[in-house]
Image (cartoon, rainbow, N blue to C red):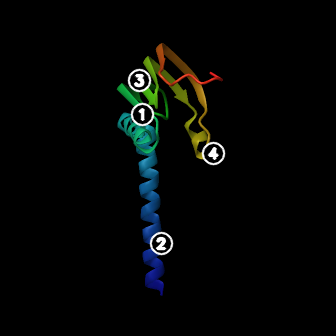
Amino acid sequence: MRGLLRVLRVTALLFLLLFVGGAAWIAGTTEGARWLLHTVSRLTEIEITARTVEGQLLDRLGLGGVRIGLAERNVEIDRLDLRLLPFHMLLGRVDIEELAVKGVRIQDDAPRTPLS
């Protein structure tokens, strides 16, 4: 029985270390931010791409050549710079401290409805 408890503790510790390491990689590296954008696009109906990704979520994140697509609507942004409060994400909130956007184009090809 003690052997089983020890194996469970070691397994739980390994999963915790993997989770913390993965979260640190996503929030603290440019590649992690790029992976997050790709994953959001893959798991949702929103397609998000960025030609350039600079910085990380823990500090400042800069995106160039951003394209956001949802159904018949598309948004293109030449440059998007933001500074998040990343620890608020642990509470399930996305708080943006600073946001700068340059060159925004919105295309809405959705059919017109009586209320639009």
Image coords of residue 110 (percent x, y) = 50, 25
Which mark is on residue 91? 4
Image coords of residue 96 (percent x, y) = 59, 28
Callout 4–callout 3 Cβ contact below 8 Å: no
SS of the residue under disc 4: helix
SS of the residue under disc 1: strand
The answer to which of marks 4 and 3 sits earlier in the sequence is: 3
List the residue tagged with mark 1.
47
Farthest-out residue, front: 114
Image coords of residue 30 (percent x, y) = 38, 33
Which mark is on residue 75? none
Farthest-out residue, top: 103
Judged by depth in the image, the label closer to the viewer, 3 or 2, is 3
Q: Amino acid at mark 4?
A: Leu
Which residue: 49% across, 17% down? Answer: 106
Q: Amino acid at mark 2?
A: Arg
Q: Amino acid at mark 1?
A: Glu
> Depth check: 27 or 103 in front?
103
Judged by depth in the image, the label closer to the viewer, 2 or 4, is 4
CA gap between label 4 and label 3 equals 27 Å
Is the residue 81 above or below the residue 49 in the image? Answer: above
CA gap between label 2 and label 4 equals 26 Å
Which residue: 38% across, 29% down? Answer: 49
The answer to which of marks 2 and 4 sits earlier in the sequence is: 2
Q: On the rendered image, what quadrant is the C terminus found in? A: top right
List the residue tagged with mark 3.
66
